[in-house]
Amino acid sequence: MIGGTIIGLIVLSAVCAPLLAPDDPEKMEMSLRLKGPSWEHPMGTDQFGRDLFTRIVYGARISLGVALIAVALSVAIGVTVGLISGYYGGLLDLLAQRLVDIFLAFPVLLLAIALVAALGPSPRNVVLALGLVGWTGYTRLVRVDVMALKNREFVQAARVSGASDARVILRHILPNVLSPVLVLATLGIGYAIVAESGLSFLGLGVQPPEPSWGWTVAFGTKFLRSAPHLSTFPGIAIMVTVLGCNLLGDGLRDVLDPRSRRR
Amino acid sequence: MLRYVANRLLLLIPVLLGITVLVFLLLHLIPGDPAVVLLGQNATPEDTERVQRVLGLDKPLPVQLGRYLLHVFEGDLGESIFQSRPVTHIVFGAMPATLELTLFALVIAALIGLPLGVLAAVRQNSVWDYGTMLLAQLGNSIPVFWLGILAILFFSVRLDLLPTFGRGEPLLQAFRQAVTGGGWGTLGDSLQHLAMPAVTLGFSAAALISRMVRASVLEVLGQDFIRTARAKGLHEGAVIVRHALRTALIPVVTIIGLQFGYLLGGAVITETVFAWPGAGRLMITAIGQRDFPLVQGAVLILALLFSLVNLIVDILYAWLNPQISYDRG
């Protein structure tokens, strides 16, 4: 409930950014540089006199957008591989599982950094990198469920009635494996936001002048003594958003999978 | 048990091969001619040719892959473009700093996470429980770089208690110096440099460990043998320490061990925040310099280390847990 409210508010503010923060996020006013929080600028201004609140509100669009598309890519790859691997088994399954093992042999962030380093820093490449490193969890989850489901009566009945493999997988098995995927994806969005901001912090993600949260924190480190608000507010934005995703993910797990409900 | 270890080692071979191929392919993901991209548009044709030769890019892809695998097998990861030194020397030179930071972070994570998790389970639904779970949620949500910056702001800028950047003498060296009568100043300085990066890195791991310990202890506390122990009239402290914890901590060993690997990944960012001279920071610097052989080398060595640690944790878990069947690979 709390998680859903937090995420709902953040999504709403990202969608309604022009209403909430009518200033242009790129508008510079050097006379106002590095001002602390005030009524006019509730989160202060940055080194170019830009309103930090405006940039954080617009930054939500980037962080959420990158994280959502990256997780969608991971889900698409992971669920597809998991469905095929679990349904057909045999050599396909063996190969898929070795591929999963190889990807799991890398610390996720390390592989994402290496991929972005090769592809070049840009939001598109961050999406690609995070999408390509995050699929293994979905595959493992879906594969186990598919292996259990494929021998159930309703699946066998569909097969006997002449349904093709694709139809059995998509119409009968897929809808039954989506609940845990939804939970993992919600938690994955939180992780993707942290990873995106980490990559941007390292200068490998979203590039200035785009109002990225991670990049703003990184730039703020140059003014830690004179303007600590510059690193503090975007960090709070990241933390609250990730906290919202984690709480929402936990809540969804409680609702969709009562067996795993925390005591 | 030996058969189980042999099986796990055999399964590791294709994984290690796959890691190496994936790291090799990284260079070929670079859009355009990697040599031109690495050297920049102003590079002379001679320079480009030299880098192509050094990286083996003048050969067909299968030949490049074969040579790369052969070289990796021989322990040769090529030469750094920027430093003109063997990649293995540079990465292994930085590795002790990374291991020191990661191990220290893991110790801190275990020291915070274990007692908090046990306390939360034993005092379920109390203020301790809610406090621990809140801390766990926060630890799970705070980006490590931001926590590092907050720590710098508070402990260095505000309180002037701890040094902001860099590393003191290597901890082991400082410790040896201290116990052989060289004074405790160096050890103190090393610990002061290590404290903030290690706590920053270990915080999220502590959050996860406390959550796992809580869940594990709660599960064990609900089992029959605990009820029997209580029915025998054992003191609650003895029930928890002698019976519950001994069983509950077996899966926790795995969690703590696996955290070491994840901390290795997190060390890349922590080292950058605190200018800690480890393999992670080396990698980020190499990315900035487009020194791709060094990036590949650092990624490969960190991934190999990650796999080995996970293997050791797996074997340790099997050894500790009598319920594990050794026949299953």
Image: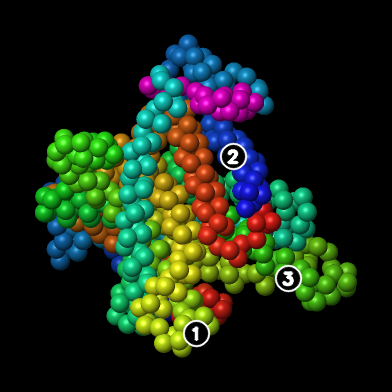
Query: Which chain's residue wears label 2?
Result: B
| Neighbours of disc 2 within 10 Å: few (<14), some (14-19), many (20+) | some
Q: Looking at the picture, which amino acid does disc 3 mark?
A: Leu
Q: CA distance from mark 1 to mark 2?
A: 47 Å
Q: Chain of mark 1?
A: B
**On residue B228, which mark appears?**
1
Q: Do circles 3 and 1 both sit on a common chain? A: no
Report which quarter residue A89 is drawn in: bottom right
Q: Which residue: 53% across, 65% down? A: A184
Secondary structure beneath label 2: helix
Residue bearing the label numbered 2: B16
- Above or below residue A19? Residue A132 is above
Q: Which residues are magenta?
A: B64-83
Q: Position of residue A243 (x, y in %)?
A: 37, 67
Residue B4 visible in image: yes
> With A47 as the anchor, is A57 left or right in this view?
right
Q: Secondary structure at mark 1?
A: helix
Q: CA distance from mark 3 to mark 1?
A: 39 Å
Q: Which mark is residue A149?
A: 3
Front tag of 3 and 2: 2
The amino acid type of the residue labelled 1 equals: Thr
Q: Residue at x 53, y 76 (%)?
A: A260
